[in-house]
Amino acid sequence: MRFIQTVLSLTFLATSVVSGFAADDYVPLFDGKTLDGWKPLPGGQWKVTDGMIVGSQDDTEKRHGMLLSEKQYGDFAVRLKYKSLEGNSGFYFRVQKIDHAVSVKGFQAEIDALGGDVGGLYETLGRAWVVQPKPEAVKKYYKPMDWNEMTVTAVGGDVTVTVNGVRTAELKNDPSARKGYFGLQLHGGQKMNVMFKDIAIKELSGTVQPIITETIHDTSRPLPKIVSPGSLESLIASSKPPQGAVVLFDGSDLDQWQGGPWTINDGNMETVEGDLMTRQGFGDCKLHVEWRIVDPDSHGNSGIYLMNLYEVQIFNSHNDRAPIYADGQAASIYGQFPPLVNACREPGQWESFDITFHRPRFDESGELTNPATVSLLHNGILVQDRVALTGPTFHKQRPPYQKHIDKLPFHLQYHGDQLQFRNIWIVEL
């Protein structure tokens, strides 16, 4: 890795980019001791016990018992943990107080002790169910009578909800209110017992910085569904470089590369030691790479570092053979986005990546104006769909962007495992 770091230093991209990054920019909305910052509305009871907000209510109470934030919020990412033992509850956001039995008008992310519609989006005194999860889906991510982690992210008209790392609801360009209070709900007419803790917020107003609410390398995050990859025969046409492509490796030599040293074995590029980096720099591009893991018992750990900063992971993930967190599986954007599905072949067989990459954009002052995006076909299957990266990819960190030049080399990582590569070409966009 020393060779790559030296080159990055020469292009004003030294590893100091990591040191200034705060590991967690979330601010607590609940101090664990008091209800400071929150105001209960008539109906139900709210108290703090053992670092938790506990809400309870008898079924004779017809009003919704609400605990509202004292402040209003616009664009944000919120994360919280809850345990629902009895009744129907919810996390309300961007709501307004009204003179009505339900106390507020606006969106809630659904919470329910029995799991009904958990993680869905319901608009109180509005459109009712806007996103309603299917019961069979809820069973896969909801933990009855246990602690569950929920995130809600709202930027403009875009809203995303996750429960235990699974995306349960998503809206794009929704016409709903853009600002309002947060609220914790006790549903009227039901016996209620619900607990909340670890409520925290990251305010996002005016930012173009993408946000991932899931914890990095969270081993409880569900692994992608395993699917059958496209056949090797069906991918032959896509392996051939189109007109105008820059052929970076065709089996004959390593003239387009520096670092390593790696070797050529029977027309295949093979790892030996050190990372291997292109001599030429690239920005927006379509990149085709074929790779295979030689030792079926190894992790097969490697990666393609676009612009030397943004990693598409290579790993021995066939049938989850080598255990790793979801955002470290093959075809993940490392530490950020697991693949939509697991389309890996058995170790020893050739895998193909077709990557479409658009670099980040910065203004003259160095501020981010557009994040980098990646789409990825793994063995002909769409596994990344124009995901917006939060910044460079690192182990256990998600550092922010720092301005860099428009074109930089990419490199193939050596992580101690034996891999082979072939048919590498790139088209500049």
Image (cartoon, rainbow, N blue to C red):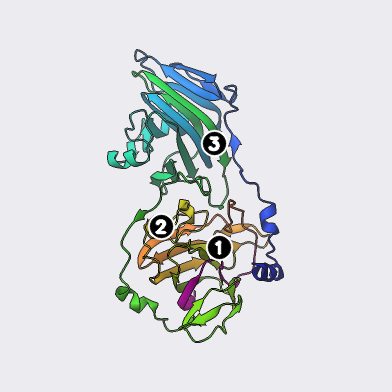
Pointers 2 and 3 in contact (CB under 8 A)?
no
Of label 1 and label 3, which has the lower sequence position?
Answer: 3
Q: Which mark is residue 35?
A: none
Q: Position of residue 295 (x, y in %)?
A: 45, 67
Q: Quadrant of residue 192?
A: top left
Please tell me whether mark 1 sits on a helix, a strand or a loop.
Answer: strand
Q: Position of residue 31 (x, y in %)?
A: 60, 27
| Residue type, numbered disc 2 | Arg
CA gap between label 1 and label 3 equals: 32 Å
| Residue type, numbered disc 1 | Tyr
Closest to the camera, between mark 1 and mark 3, is: 1
Q: Which quadrant: the N terminus?
A: bottom right
| Residue type, numbered disc 3 | Tyr
CA gap between label 2 and label 3 equals: 44 Å
Closest to the camera, between mark 2 and mark 1, is: 2
Q: Quadrant of residue 201?
A: top right
Q: Which mark is residue 310?
A: 1
Q: What residue is shown with label 3?
A: 73
Q: Position of residue 87 (x, y in %)?
A: 36, 23
Q: Residue 403 vs residue 234: left or right?
A: right
Report the span colored magenta. 403-429
